[in-house]
Image: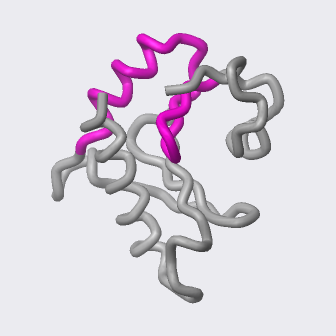
Amino acid sequence: MILFSENKMSKWCDILKPGKKFVEFGDTVVVTDSKEHAKDVLREHGPFEIGTESADFSVMKIDKGWIVSCNHPDLLTFVSEKEVSPGEPDYVIGILGRGKRAEAAKKL
């Protein structure tokens, strides 16, 4: 877990608006300035159950990959272009991002 101010070289510095503070859990990030709040958000919204809102996601293409969002607006996951085959549909990328988010929550 890395708080924004501790890692200015993070890929998230290029992805998020300048000045946004975040706590990084590998490829998953919670936009906040509190480590404890970030852990709470990830514990509650990281795991998912198929058929519920927790399994829903949106996929947004960015430079060198995609951002996968979920039912919490401050919880985001990065999926690199290197992690998927060219031409994969958004749902495949979203499922991968959702899995990475859930894995990050398990590691807390």
Quarter of image, res 65:
bottom right
Q: Residue at x 67, y 23 (%)?
A: 4
Q: Nearer the viewer, residue 72 or 107?
A: 107
Looking at the picture, how far across and down is residue 69, in whole percent? 49, 49
Q: Is residue 6 above or below residue 104?
A: above
Quarter of image, res 15:
top right
Q: Residue at x 58, y 55 (%)?
A: 67
Tell me if 65 is positioned left or right of 72 in this view: right
Question: Quick check: is 27 in the magenta stretch?
Answer: yes
Q: Nearer the viewer, residue 50 or 78?
A: 78
Q: Residue at x 32, y 39 (%)?
A: 46
Quarter of image, res 6:
top right
Q: Is residue 10 above or below residue 67?
A: above
Looking at the picture, how far across and down is residue 87, in whole percent? 56, 88
In the picture, which quadrant includes the C terminus? top left
Q: Residue at x 38, y 46 (%)?
A: 101
Hey, which residue is sitting farthest right in the picture? Answer: 18
Question: Quick check: is 16 in the magenta stretch?
Answer: no
Looking at the picture, how far across and down is residue 21, in whole percent? 67, 21
Looking at the picture, how far across and down is residue 48, in whole percent? 23, 47
> Which span is picked out in magenta?
22-47
